[in-house]
Image (spheres, helix red, strand yellow):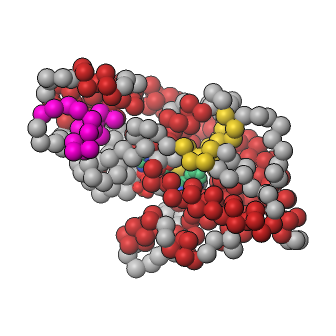
Amino acid sequence: MGEVKMNKRKRTFSGIQPTGSLHIGNYIGTIKQWVEMQKDHQCIYCVVDLHAITVPKKPEVLKERIREVAALFIACGVDPEKSIIFIQSHNPDHSVLSWIMDCTASMGQLERMTQYKSKSEKQKGFVSVGLFNYPALMAADILLYQTDVVPVGDDQKQHVELTRDLAQRFNSRYGEVFTEPEVSLQKVGARVMSLQDPSAKMSKSDEDPNGTIDLLDSLEEVKKKIMSAVTDSGKEIVFKKEKLAISNLLGIYSQLGNISIEELEKKYQGKGYGEFKKDLVEAVVEFLKPIQKKYYRIMKNQEGLEKILKQGGEKARAISQKTLAEVYKVMGLG
Ligand code: ATP
Ligand code: LTN
C-alpha cells in the first residue's frame, strides 16, 4: 500500500457539496454516520466546492455556502479536534488526481452513472464536461486518502462502486497503490424521501420546499411541513413497502429521536396519523434546536471557523501528498 498507516484505525472520507441548505436527509443518510464514526475511525470530512461548480454558481453565494456547510458539520457534532474538516479547493491534489482518474475511467463507465443522466437532463442546454467527469473527481477525493470507508446516502453508492473499479484498474496497471474503499449506508434512512412525494428522494434541489426539512428551518416551518406531509391510505402506523409515506416518517422519527421502528410501531398502535405527526414535530424540533443554536454561535466567530478550515486543509494535504508522490512514481510522471 502506498502510504503506511501508522495508526490502526480505519480511515473514513466523505463530502457534501455547498449547493444549498442541508436537510435532514443529508443528516440522516450521511452526517449522522460521520459523527458516530469519530469514535473509532480516523475521519476526514470535506466541503466539496469543486463538485459544486459543475453547474455555474454565483461567486459570493458559493463562498458563503461553503462556510455555512462547514459550520453545519460542526453544529451536527463533527468535532474538529477529532476529525479533519476542510475545503476541497484548499488542497490542489484533488484536481491533479482527478485528471489521472479521468485517464483511468472509460467514457462508457461514466455514461452509466445515473446521477449524471438525471442531472444532465435537468440542465437547460448547457451540460459541462465537469458534470460528466464529476465521479472521477469524487474517486480522486476518496483514493487520495487511502480511504477504507465512505459513509454516504444510497444515491452515492454507484459512485463509490466506480471508485473501487478505478482503484482496481489503476492497481492492476501500476501496482498496489490505492486502498479499495467500502461504502457505508444507514440501515434506516439511506434514502430519506420527500414529505410531499414519498416516491422521490428528499433533495436540496427540490422545487417544492415543503418536501424538504432543512436543518436551519424555523420551528414553525417544521411544524407546517410535517403536518402537511402526505400520508398513505388506511390508518395503520407500520413500516412496510406498501406504506411509503408513513414508513418514511417512521424512519425520520426513528433516526432523529433515537428510538427503534419497533418501539414506534408499538407506541402508535391504534392511534391516528394526527397524533403521530404531532409527536414527530416535537422530536424533529428537539433535534434541531441545539444544532441551530450551535450553528449560529459558530457563524458568529468566522475567524475561528477559518482557522479550523485552514488547519484541516494542511492536515489533509500532508496525507494526500504521500499518495500523490507514489502515483507520480509508479506512473513515471515528472
Ligand atoms: P441534490 O439533490 O441537489 O443533488 P442532495 O440533497 O442530494 O443534493 P448532496 O450534496 O448531493 O445533496 O448529498 C450529500 C450527502 O447526503 C450524500 O452522501 C448523499 O447521498 C446524502 N443524501 C442526500 N439526500 C439524501 C436523502 N434524501 N436521504 C439520505 N441521504 C441523502
Ligand atoms: N458526490 C457526493 C459528494 C462527494 C463525496 C465525495 C462523497 C464528493 N466527493 C467523496 C463521499 C466521498 C454527493 O453527495 N453528491
Extreme left residue here?
Answer: 234
Residue at 78% in and 47% down: 319
Residue at 39% in and 30% down: 256
When the figure is inspected, residue 142 is found, relative to residue 134, above or below; the finding is above
Q: Does residue 231 show up?
A: yes
Name the side, left or right, on which 153 lies relative to 138.
left
Name the side, left or right, on which 204 lies relative to 198.
right
Q: Quadrant of residue 237?
A: top left
Residue 236 included in the magenta stretch of the image: yes
Question: Closer to the camera, 287 or 14?
Answer: 14
The number of numbered badges drawn on the structure is: 0
The range drawn in magenta is 235-251
Residue 57 included in the magenta stretch of the image: no
Name the side, left or right, on which 27 lies relative to 166.
left
What is the x, y in percent for residue 74? 56, 34
Q: Quadrant of residue 308?
A: top right
Q: Does residue 95 show up?
A: no
Residue at 63% in and 58% down: 164
Residue at 56% in and 71% down: 109
What is the x, y in percent for residue 85? 65, 41
What is the x, y in percent for residue 264? 28, 24
Quarter of the image with the C terminus in it: bottom right
When the figure is inspected, residue 218 is found, relative to residue 100, above or below; the finding is above
What is the x, y in percent for residue 36? 56, 30
Question: Closer to the camera, 278 or 187?
Answer: 187
